[in-house]
Image (cartoon, helix red, strand yellow):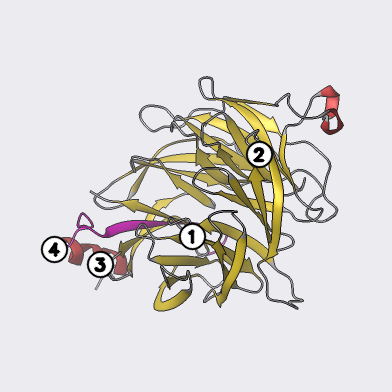
């Protein structure tokens, strides 16, 4: 007898029983992965927000190393970076666009283009949703790619190479390493965390042309190569290795996760797009002596709590946010339930946190105490091959 896949059986049962994901409180969870092992691309799970139950629906789309994925505001299209070092003979990775089937969650590939640098590791959108912004880790570049009306992605309209003084870590800071990029609240700038430079850079962003440029407001002592001036928004302590960044809802407080020293640096905006350091706090337990790489940072939708992940300590750290000052107070540190929690996300209701443990191949769920911010494992664990990015999508 021919073997029928578990994912197919689940799909048949859902639709045969009238339990499609079109019901309220149901979502699709997309999982980006590394495909060097068992994984073949992007996987999907049904998520019941009422119960917290995850149901595997199998492979949504086959693609190479979709290590970071993002979904447009209308939940019609998904975009994935392809974290590779060579694309069609060039020193570049790729970006692939998919159309989302809102009934089944399956992804139909629309097209793919070069990312503008090797090993793209992050993708986001400008505030108008007209451009994708990509950070290329090994290439040390950031790129702007237009999003066309049919969801396809165009060739880069702008590519910038990060520049500045390197950090002291000779193994990890030997060159610029762009690791994260997001547009500012008013869509006038693009912030870039560069692990190799120990800086969060700020580029001018022209939302009409889709171009990045260096600012001219930096003081002379920060002049870059060839007389150009780099417009820095925040300078981190040497060896911090900024990886990802989270902003308060009003954009006035910036939280920078240091991958290399496992810290969160807090910066306050002085209203001139200059961020001043007000706090630095560790995400590790006192006396920790092993190797650790911090990975993800997320602010709870309420704005009351901030969470980070530790790869090595294999934990999720929770902090309370002082709404008046933006400063953090440590709440709790809990085991992630697996090895190497590279990414995590908070569900659309704000009631649960789901952690993707890359090396143990699982997604572990926690409830979030809405009063204290504390995390408690629910017991819900889903298997996933090399999960490295989690994104929720609503369904029709």
Horizontal side, residue 125 vs residue 214: left or right = left
Horizontal side, residue 309 vs residue 150: left or right = right
Residue beneath disc 4:
16
Tell us which disc is closer to us: 3 or 2.
Answer: 2
Q: What is the secondary structure assignment of the residue under circle 4?
A: helix
Image quadrant where residue 182 sits: top right
Instruction: Say which label, 2 or 1, has the lower sequence index.
Output: 2
Residue beneath disc 3:
10
Mark-to-mark CA distance, 2 and 1: 22 Å
Mark-to-mark CA distance, 4 and 2: 57 Å
Mark-to-mark CA distance, 3 and 4: 10 Å
Mark-to-mark CA distance, 4 and 1: 42 Å
Tell us which disc is closer to us: 4 or 2.
Answer: 2
Q: Quadrant of the N terminus?
A: bottom left
Span highlighted in magenta in the image: 16-37
Marks 3 and 2 in Cβ contact (< 8 Å): no
Marks 4 and 1 in Cβ contact (< 8 Å): no
Horizontal side, residue 337 vs residue 119: left or right = left
Tell us which disc is closer to us: 1 or 3.
Answer: 1
Q: Which mark is residue 304?
A: 1
| Neighbours of disc 4 within 10 Å: few (<14), some (14-19), many (20+) | few
Instruction: Say which label, 3 or 2, has the lower sequence index.
Output: 3
Q: Nearer the viewer, residue 64 or 17?
A: 17
Q: Nearer the viewer, residue 303 or 77?
A: 303
Image quadrant where residue 133 sits: top right
x, y (%) of residue 251? 55, 42
């Amino acid at each position: 007898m021919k073997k029928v896949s578990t994912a197919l059986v689940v799909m048949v049962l859902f639709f045969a029983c009238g339990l499609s994901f079109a019901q309220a409180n149901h979502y699709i969870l997309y999982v980006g992965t590394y495909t060097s092992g068992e994984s073949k691309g992007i996987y999907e799970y049904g998520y019941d927000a009422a119960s917290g139950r995850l149901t595997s629906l199998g492979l949504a789309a086959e693609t190479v190393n979709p290590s970071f994925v993002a979904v447009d505001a209308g939940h019609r299209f998904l975009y994935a970076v392809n974290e590779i070092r060579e694309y069609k003979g060039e020193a570049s990775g790729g970006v692939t666009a998919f159309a989302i089937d809102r009934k089944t969650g399956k992804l139909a590939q629309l097209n793919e283009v070069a990312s503008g640098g090797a090993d793209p590791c992050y993708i986001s959108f400008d505030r108008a949703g007209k451009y994708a912004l990509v950070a290329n880790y090994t290439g040390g570049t950031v790129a702007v790619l237009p999003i066309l009306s049919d969801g396809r992605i165009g060739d880069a309209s702008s590519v910038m190479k990060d520049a500045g003084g390197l950090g002291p870590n000779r193994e990890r800071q030997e060159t610029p390493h762009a690791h994260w990029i997001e547009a500012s609240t008013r869509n006038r700038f693009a912030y870039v965390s560069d692990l190799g430079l120990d800086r969060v850079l700020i580029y001018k962003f022209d939302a009409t042309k889709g171009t990045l440029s260096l600012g001219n407001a930096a003081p002379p002592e920060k002049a870059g190569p060839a007389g150009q001036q780099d417009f820095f928004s925040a300078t981190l302590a040497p060896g911090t290795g900024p990886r990802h960044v989270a902003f308060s809802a009003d954009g006035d407080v910036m939280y920078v996760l240091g991958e290399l020293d496992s810290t969160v640096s807090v910066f306050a905006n002085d209203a001139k797009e200059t961020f001043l350091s007000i706090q630095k706090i560790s995400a590790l337990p006192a006396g920790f002596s092993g190797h650790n790489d911090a990975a993800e940072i997320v602010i709870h939708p309420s704005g009351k709590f901030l969470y980070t992940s530790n790869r090595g300590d294999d934990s999720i750290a929770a902090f309370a946010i002082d709404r008046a000052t933006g400063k953090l107070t440590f709440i709790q540190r809990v085991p992630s339930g697996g090895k190497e929690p590279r990414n995590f996300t908070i569900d659309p209701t704000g009631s649960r946190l789901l952690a993707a443990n890359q090396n143990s191949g699982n997604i572990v769920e926690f409830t979030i105490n809405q009063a204290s911010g504390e995390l408690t494992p629910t017991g819900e664990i889903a298997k996933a091959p090399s999960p490295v990015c989690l994104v929720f999508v609503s369904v029709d």
